Structure formats: C-alpha cells, structure tokens
Amino acid sequence: EAGLASWPLVPGHEWSGRIIALGSGCPSHFPVGQRVVGEHATGCRALEASDSTVMKPREASATLGCTDCAARGGFLRCPRRAETGFFRRPGALQTFMRFPAAQLHVLPDSVPRELAALAEPLATALKAVRLAGLSAESQQEDSASRTVVVGDGPVALLVLQALRWRRCRVACLVGANASRLRRASELGADSVWNVAERDADGLVTSLQDAGELPSVVIEAAGTPSAVALSIKLAAPGGQVVLLGLSGNRVSEIRADDIVLKQLVVRGSLASEPEDWRAAAEMMSSGAMQSVVTHTLVGLDRYGQAIHLVKDPPQGMLKLQILLGVDESCDWGTVAVADGSPRSKRARIA
C-alpha cells in the first residue's frame, strides 16, 4: 500500500525463459533458443538513454544527470526506476515478454528452468555476502569466516548456500520453523537454533561454547526482533548485514551494543549486475539447490497461487508457477535481447 506499484500491472518478478526473437543490434551471445534470466531493476536515466548499447546503464545515468543513478547501486533508490513485475516494466506472468538485452544473463541448459527462476533472490543473497566482504578468494578452508544467518525463509536458505559456495563456515542458522531448520542442516549449516523453543541467551552461550561468536551475521528474517538478535550475536569488531524488510515496523535495539562492540551494521538492498553474474556462475556450477516446495502449472492457476501464499499449507517454503508443461518450449519467459529499453530487445517466452 505504501509502495510504488499500482494497478493494473503484470506480476512476475522472478523468472527464467528462452529467447524466441531478437531485436536489431542484439549481442551475438544471445541466440534464439538461449536460456536466460534478467536483472530486476533499471534506473530512470538508463531507460531514457537513446543508445545504451554504447553506454552501460550506470554510465548512461551519470551522463544524463540522475544523482541517484550516478552512484554505485543508486539505481535501486531511484524513484523513477523500472522494476520487473512491480512498476514501469511488465512481469513474467504472461505468455511472452520483451526485455532489454543489456540486463540478460545466459544460463546453460543444465540449469533447469525451475531453478533458473530463482536467480533474482539468489542475486539478492549474494549481494549481502559480498557486502560482508566474503568471497571465495578471501576464504581459506582452514580459516574461513565464522558466520550466522538469522532467518529460515527462502532468502535465508539462499544466503546459507551462497556462504557455503564462498567457502564460509555457517556456524548456525536461526529460525522458528522445524522443517525449514532441517532443510538448513541439509544445506550445510553446522547447527540450527529454533527460537520458538529456546531463548536467545542460550544461543549466545552455545556459540561461545562451540568456539566464538561469529564475525559476520546476516539477517534475512524480515522481523524487528531479528535485527536486535543479529546485533546481539555478532562478535566484537564484527559485521551485521541487514537484508530483511519488516514492513516499516519498528525494531528496538540497544545502540550501546553497537558502540561498545564496535560493530559495522549495514543494509543490503536487492542486487546489482555483479551479483547477477555471480548468481549465473553459482547456478551454472551446480552449487545451488532449490528452495521451491510447491509448483502450479498454467496462468489460470494464479488465483490459487495467491491463495496459497496468503494461507500457506504446512511445510510450504516457496511456490512457483510454470507457464507450460513442455520443457522444450519453456513457456512463460520470452527474452527480447537489447541494449536499450526502446530497441534491440530480446523477446522471451
């Protein structure tokens, strides 16, 4: 209600598909039939640039004077940006869609379309890991950063997988759902902690007994209490990355904990192009497992999907809609490959 989206709109923020037609000037690495995923947001000035085949979106924005878009990652704060399935760009819940080639990323056929459609939340998870300064190059198996993930939803489980891919040790994943916590253990968390059954003070003691408090805590729960817990769990001199959104609810934190422990606390919003490249690399390597638990087939099931999301059955983690049953067609995403939103696009089905 307080966001930028308005009716009517075509939803579908997370998607994958195949290119079925190309606009003029599309790059040669986008052949018809190629499986692709697409970045979710474009800054306003990139939308207005007449030749973004020459200027990258951020460069175009800087040239045309948008102060938000000129800053690194600033396009995510631009009030005139376009976001797929939210505003100024139709989403993927349609038979075909047009999409700028400059924001498409290639995936091999070895990545199933159901998994490929998780590229957007995976890129979001990878950005949080990147902002914490964690990369495969910085981690050695014998001295990997000790991390904790607060949250047990789909994004939290993707953060867990991103950390493991970056060779980080996930000392604990914290949540309140037993089945999701079991899944976290399967995905590589050293331990899990159910806050619905045990208190946070016990978690601090448990982490200390197991070695030390984590140098990095990534909050991906989207609840006010999770912010305070994340700050409490971080080791002195450590980092807290806040990834969840709580719907403008107020979080009560003790600022002295931040000051006395000299913590670095930062927010991580959505994703940037480098995170999409990392997501494509991670999925292509086979390092990612799905967090989808329920699937519906066909656009006519959209109403049922909304009902299930509003009133989820026991064990549901994430629901996905497939727009066709023929894998050779990949109906549901048509890529229009292009450097500019006005021309040279890819049409995706």
Image: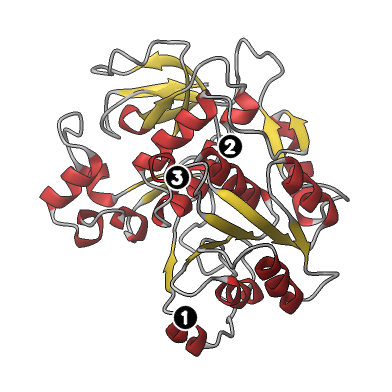
Question: Which of pointers 1 and 2 lies earlier in the amino acid sequence?
Answer: 2
In the displayed structure, does residue 78 sit left or right of residue 162?
Answer: left
- Which element is circle 3 on? loop
Mark 2 sits on what residue?
118
Tag in front: 3 or 2: 3
Q: Position of residue 169 (x, y in %)?
A: 58, 49
Q: Position of residue 84 (x, y in %)?
A: 46, 43
Residue 121 appears in view: no
CA distance separating discs 3 and 2: 25 Å
Residue 139's mark?
3
Question: Which of pointers 3 and 1 lies earlier in the amino acid sequence?
Answer: 3
Q: Residues within 10 Å of mark 3 (few under 14, many from 20)?
A: some
Where on the picture, by quarter, is residue 12? top right
Where on the picture, by quarter, is residue 99? top left
Q: Amino acid at mark 3?
A: Gln
Q: Residues within 10 Å of mark 2 (few under 14, many from 20)?
A: many
